[in-house]
Amino acid sequence: MEKSLNWREFVVTRAIKASGYSAIVFVLLIFVFLMREGLPALSEVDAGNLFSLRWYPIEDLFGILPLITGSLIVTFGAALIAVPFGIGTAIYISEIAPRWMREILKPLVELLGGLPSVVLGFLGILIVSPNLRILLDLPTGLTAFTGSLLLGGIAVPTVVSVAEDALDSVPRAYREGAWALGATKWQTIWRVTLPAAKSGVLTAIMLGVGRAIGETMTVMMVTGNAPVLATSLGSLFSPVRTMTATIAAEMGEVANGSVHYHTLFLIGIILFLISLTVNVIASSVVFRAKKRAERILS
Amino acid sequence: MVVIMTDKIIIENLSLQYSDGAESLRGISMGIPQNAVTVLFGPAGGGKSTLLRCLNRLNDLTDIKTSSGRILIDGENILDPKTDVIALRRKVGMVFARPVPLPMSIRENITYGLELAGEKNRIKLDEAVERSLKLAAIWDEVKDRLNDPAVALSGGQQQRVCLARVLALQPEIILLDEPTSGLDPISTGKVEAALQELKKNYTIILVPHSIQQAARTADHAAFFLQGELIEYDEGKTMFTTPKQKKTEDYIMGRFG
Amino acid sequence: MMKLFARNRHAVQRIGYTLITLMAVATVIPIVGTVIFILFQGGSAISWEFLTGFPYDGMRSGGILPAIIGTLYLTIGTAIFSVPLGIAAAIYLSEYAKDTPLTRIIRLAIINLAGIPSVVYGLFGLGLFVLFLQFGTSILAASLTLSIMTLPVIISTAEEALRSVPQSFRTVSISLGATRWQTIRRIVLKEALPGILTGVILGLERAAGETAPILFTGAAFFLPQLPQTPFDATMALPYHLFVISTQVPEMPIQIQYGTALVLLVFVLTMNVIATIIRSRARAKRQW
């Protein structure tokens, strides 16, 4: 009895520990396989071509700059929407809303995070883009801006939940101190609570942006898919094509092992590195803020 | 302070330091006799709880920087890495300061330890439930609602169920770490009465929550201060004519 | 003067509150609007034939059964891999891991997994499962890809649920002669179960709605029959919606809305179940 118990305990413990390390294994695996399939592109496509302004794979033109700028401009537009609305909603939920309202809003925002991006893209095609075309008098409604609008919606839940966590974790004593000094609730929010939650709110913004830049289906469906270099903010209102959409749209049709195939993986590496950077910075911001809080409290 | 070889527990030169620098023990040596209540008392942070947690190796769960010395129970050094800690913890039961009923029924709380030990016989489990609840002086209060969640009981009842839960395992030694600190005087009285009854068959080590409780319950008493054992004597002697100045000061309420 | 100042401050507060409230409303209305709109538009397309039939006439007629079944298969497949692994990893982090550099690296890896774009998961799945391990474009490859993507959601919510179980339960259990694993299995897991379940469902909900990771790993444009083995490709609701809203000319709009509705209901049901489990567990909790 005792013996078999010990044996089972040993096996279970080993399995649990191995699972604990699995996340590291997967990140490494992802990195290795992206490299394996993507790095050959660097020798197959010369630098002049790669950093040119034309993405036209049929003629072996693999300029990735239009795709990068496409991603950047759509994400920029999305951030313009998601940051104020996300933080505003977070402030409302954490500081202003009565309790019952909070209980309704939090699951609703969570629900938005769960809406499949393809459904948003679908509505984008049918509803948002035709109306935008008429409203803004554009030749087509499938523009970077359309993508930004929808991507903003996709990034909002991330921003809200992280920012709300940050606001929520500001000690109540801070607020009470401010109220005791005669500050209105509004002043307290702006001068005490928000500054105290600054690093968390920053993390929220970064993670929201990270979510937006990696989003695929919605942007593929509504941004018009024209690989044109975005040079100014005016490009917001013309069709663009993002890195993610390019991979999604073209990977299904390329021959495995071709130059085009390798180049799409190379774009994948770029996306991977961007998300890596965003997340490492975001988590180090949180980490540092936690350390500072510990110093203050001890 | 003579170490007698017939003592149930013999502690030899026990020292311990936690990684975070908290409460530690310095060179503790003492013998703890069978069938008596031995009280460990002194100001907070003196090492009483740490010593208790050494006796059932509960300190294994905590980060420990250094430890040395031996603890012999029935002549065996339980600090030896080869000790079967599971068997040790069945032999050395512990009741905590705050009653912690496990999130299950009263009955399941009592049978939990036995089932872990492999006991499946329903009749034996029922017997154990009744016997241990009676020993802990709580049977009459809960016998009609054994399947109710244990958290539904009052604090005093919970603590006696926790005592019964320990007794169900038929331990030889019972450690109690301020078991009445959150209880009202009546519940406290019931727990103390139960202990007086139990000491006939068990070795009981109690960290009391007040000097009054120490004086009421102690057959033997040990005064701890900042990790050191200052004085160890019979309870009656200790609380009437302490030999050490520090002990006297503490008992008289001059510090702590 | 003082009075005026005070009135000003309160006016500012009123304006500010109104502004923030409007922002929250502007955020929430489109969510509710989207759901209601699709429910209304898609409702008329729903029929027994639509839910149980195969598409025909280049998907312009018939039902979406293979897509529904496919999404079900993919969700179950994802659960098979990600749930045990995710919960075990959460147990490791909450119950076994100490605060060492290695643990910090594990946490960083989890955060990174959560941030990797879904289409990059698709590339990875293509490279590892479809090509290198030669699973082909299949339910197996797609489920494995979705599993790894779902893993961080399950790990982090399950870990939070495990951590919220009071430490004293563990101490007491150990003091009664339980081993660490007995304590976890009989006390900690049991108490954390609702929280873990919520996290699992939310993770699977995301997997069920994803398109990009299955694009090149397991999704099929059209199949005349249901997949027979895990090595077959499959249709799936999100991919099907993508196909019929962008790739098929003259697609009847009714079928598009109907498909969106079914997908939405699939995902929303999971979401609502998760929310209910969580709030009921909170109400019932005794500690």
Image: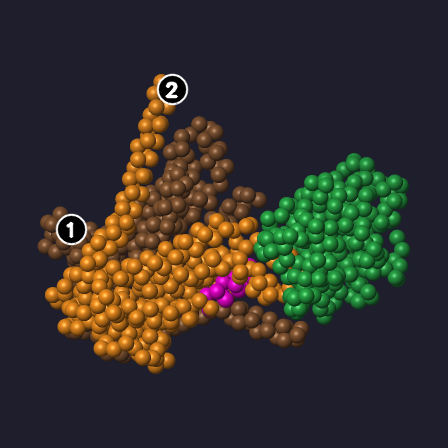
| Residue A175 seen in the figure | yes
Q: Which residue, as the protein is rendered here, is positioned at the far bottom? A: C134
- Residue drawn 88% across and 61% down? B6
As for residue C86 lying within the magenta part, the answer is yes
Label 2's element? Answer: helix
Q: What colouring style does the render use? A: by chain
Where residue C218 sits: x, y (%)?
A: 30, 74
The chain that hosts pointer 2 is C
Indicate whether C246 appears above or below B96. Answer: below
Decide: few, some or many residues near mark 2? Use Cα within 10 Å; few <14, some 14-19, many ≥20: few
| Tint applied to chain A in the drawing | brown
Label 1's element? Answer: helix
- Closer to us: A269 or B193: B193
Position of the N terminus of chain C by quadrant? top left
- Closer to us: C235 or A96: C235
Instruction: From the rendered image, report the letter of the chain displayed in green.
Output: B
The residue under label 2 is which amino acid type?
Met
Decide: few, some or many residues near mark 1? Use Cα within 10 Å; few <14, some 14-19, many ≥20: some
The chain that hosts pointer 1 is A
- Closer to us: B21 or C173: C173
Query: Residue under circle 2?
Result: C2
- Residue drawn 64% across and 52% down? B144
Query: Residue under circle 1?
Result: A132
Instruction: From the rendered image, report the letter of the chain displayed in orange.
Output: C
